[in-house]
Image: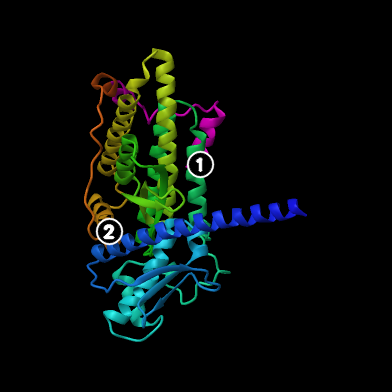
Amino acid sequence: MLIKIVNILLVIRGFMKFDNILKEMFSRVIFQLYKEYDHICYQYKLKLKKPMIIIEDLSATWGTWNSQNKIITLSSKLISDYSWDIVLNILKHEMAHQIVSEIFLVNENHGIYFHKACDLIALPKDYRKSTLNMEDKISHWKNSNFEVEDQNILRKVEKLLSLAQSANENESLLAMEKVQEIYSKYNIKRIQDNINSEYCTLIINFKKKVVPSTYIYISSLIQSHYFVNVIYSDLYDPLSDESHKIIEIIGTKQNVLMAEFVFYFLKERINSLWENYQKINSVPNRYKLSYQKGILDGFQNKLNKIQSDKVKNLNSNEMSKNKIMLILQNEDLKLNSFTKNLFPKLTKKGATSNKVYTSYFDEGKNEGKKIILNKPMNESTNKNNLLKLLI
């Protein structure tokens, strides 16, 4: 009997410890929520009375706004089960209700003024719904259905990049060039057909406090050639009580997914190319960063030249150079406007000042420049045949 009582007490003690840990985590989360609240007000130039923010077990909703008592309540399940970007959007949803109450001085739930408030703080449409029941769990737009043409293009891109897996710089850049070519035609056709593409964001979380400088080089390349904007920011992690660096890729859903493929492809390729180079030349590991930056710089220069040559060599049957440039410029303006709406106080940031060993940077850069894209593909090679059939 005594043993049973001891075991029960130990279990209760364990629950008490867990409960205390949970309470401590929620208190840290609430502190972070106040910081996020202040940051949102700063970003969007809002003058709101700071409410009380609490976390409770809500059975049917993700959050509530009490206009009488000035309280924002968020679901404990939301905090424990979902990533911080989702938490922030639910916080924004409740702040939109506060804006309706305090700025528009209107008493309504999800009417015209609520949607105006959502526009003020760039709240995504998926988070503007009048009911966010627990049964309707928030799913990422990546899981939504795409048009048949979109699905086919994305499958081509994914397969194209997956086929270029060897540590071969020719294959790597050939794959990137083909992806760029596919999406250039695809985007221009969509614009010509007046197909409105919804913009969205996709987060890549490194779980790191510092962004590797090679990632910044990769992001620059993607932004220059694959119809997206790339933003670096921070995202809080409640479990570790730390903020990690993240990349937010912004663009149409199709282009954002394509840019994600290319990002991970390049991240993997520069590691493979370095391992191959190091093995052949017996180079110390301290030169890795310089070599990889050189590879990416060489890729960037090669893609710049390809893009420039394609515009110069347009056939008479194709659209004029000026018309294409105008189409792309207009699309850039729309994307930049959407990005600026999300990040009103956005500032530009270049690559970090990590030391670069010049000679090995030049080695990598030369490898990138030496890539020959117009060389006919070997018909006897299955992989190359597959690459050719995809286009």
Depicted 121 relative to depicted 142: above or below: below
Residue 250 among magenta residues: no
Local crowd size for mark 2, using a 10 Å CA cut-off: few (<14), some (14–19), many (≥20): some
Frontmost residue, 308 versus 106: 106
- Split into 4 quadrants, where in the image is the N terminus? bottom right
Query: As drawn, which residue projects farthest toward the front?
Result: 2
Labels 2 and 1: the sequence-earlier one? 2
Lateral position of residue 11 relative to residue 234, left or right = right
> Residue placed at 40% from the left, 57% from the top?
28
Residue 388 among magenta residues: yes
Q: Position of residue 34 (x, y in %)?
A: 33, 63
Magenta residue span: 363-391
Frontmost residue, 24 versus 310: 24
Q: Position of residue 291 (x, y in %)?
A: 32, 24
Label 1: state its secondary structure. Answer: helix
Which amino acid, by three-letter code, is at mark 1? Leu
Lateral position of residue 110 relative to residue 162, left or right = left
Report the residue marked by disc 1.
390
Depicted 373 relative to depicted 252: above or below: above
